[in-house]
Image (cartoon, rainbow, N blue to C red):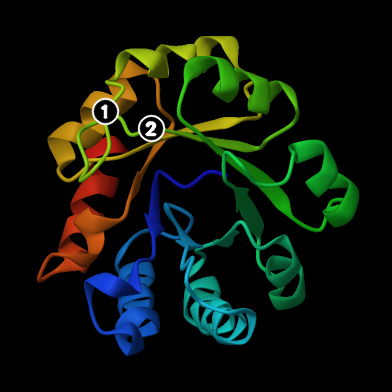
């Protein structure tokens, strides 16, 4: 994954019918390939989630933005997504690879240095590590663990997530070792998500 900013959906933060429209606007506002989208709606059943993934792909892909699906390997394959992001307690990377073959890129979300390194060693193309900064209900791990980038394969992207709500924090995460940053609340709980994401891309390009 070459994107510098990963925008993770959370329709609880705004009207759900606005997701595709907002994603399309963000994707068109930044250079192609600099932003990726991850559909992460844990409470949606399979049918509605599949429809949402397809809607996101329809607006993001023409703008050069890849689309990943959180956890649901089956729906990622059906929808023709670019990748699947496996949570800490989700499928093992080896099992997911056996199912997906090379049809999908595989990512892993981790919360500690050791498990992040293990995921990279197992073949994850993306390792999402966090929360780096404070987020509601979660204890931050800080930027120091991002130094594991030097111990990971160059083919694995290290993505910092958690509390990255400003260009300054994005730059801090990248200086500490991250290849990219992921945002959830910061992208959706603002009046102008396009400007916020564009500022993050500009900050770490």
User: Within 10 Å of the Cα at label 1, are there few (<14), some (14-19), or many (20+) other Cα atoms?
Assistant: some
Q: CA distance from mark 2 to mark 1?
A: 7 Å
Q: Position of residue 96 (x, y in %)?
A: 79, 48
Circle 2 packing at 10 Å, graded few (<14), some (14-19), many (20+), is many
Please tell me which residue is depicted at 31% across the width and 69% down the height of the picture.
26
Q: Is residue 199 left or right of residue 46?
A: left
Residue 196 at x, y = what percent? 17, 57
Report which quarter residue 191 is drawn in: bottom left
Quadrant containing the C terminus in the rendered view? top left
Quarter holding the N terminus is: top right
Q: How many marks?
A: 2
Q: Say whether residue 5 is left or right of residue 14.
A: right
Q: Which mark is residue 129?
A: none
Q: Is residue 167 left or right of residue 152?
A: left
Cβ–Cβ below 8 Å for labels 2 and 1?
yes
Q: Quadrant of residue 23?
A: bottom left
Vertical order, 205 against 10 (above or below): above
Residue plotted at (45% across, 60% down): 32
36 vs 80, left or right, is left
Q: Secondary structure at mark 2?
A: loop
For the point 66% across and 20% down, which residue is it?
118
Q: Residue 5, image x and y in percent?
A: 37, 48
Residue 140: image tag: 1
Residue placed under numbered mark 2 in the picture: 130
The residue shown at (40%, 58%) is 8
Q: Position of residue 107 (x, y in %)?
A: 62, 43
Earlier residue among tags 2 and 1:
2
Relative to 159, residue 200 above or below: below
């Amino acid at each position: 994954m070459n994107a510098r900013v990963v925008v993770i959906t959370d329709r609880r933060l705004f009207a759900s019918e606005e997701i595709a429209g907002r994603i399309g606007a963000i994707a068109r506002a930044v250079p192609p390939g600099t932003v990726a989208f991850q559909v992460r709606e844990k409470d949606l059943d399979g049918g509605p989630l599949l429809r949402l993934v397809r809607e996101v792909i329809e607006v993001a892909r023409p703008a050069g933005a890849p689309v990943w699906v959180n956890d649901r390997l089956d729906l990622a394959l059906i929808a023709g997504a670019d990748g699947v992001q496996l949570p800490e307690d989700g499928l093992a990377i080896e099992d997911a690879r056996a199912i997906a073959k090379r049809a999908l890129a595989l990512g892993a979300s981790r919360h500690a240095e050791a498990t992040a390194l293990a995921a990279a060693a197992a073949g994850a193309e993306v390792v999402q590590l966090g929360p780096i900064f404070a987020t509601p209900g979660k204890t931050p791990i800080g930027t120091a663990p991002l130094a594991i980038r030097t111990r990971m394969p160059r083919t694995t992207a290290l993505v910092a997530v958690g509390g990255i709500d400003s260009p300054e924090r994005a730059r801090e995460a990248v200086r500490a070792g991250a290849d990219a940053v992921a945002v959830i609340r910061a992208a959706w709980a603002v009046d102008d998500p396009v400007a916020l994401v564009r500022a993050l891309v500009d900050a770490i390009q």
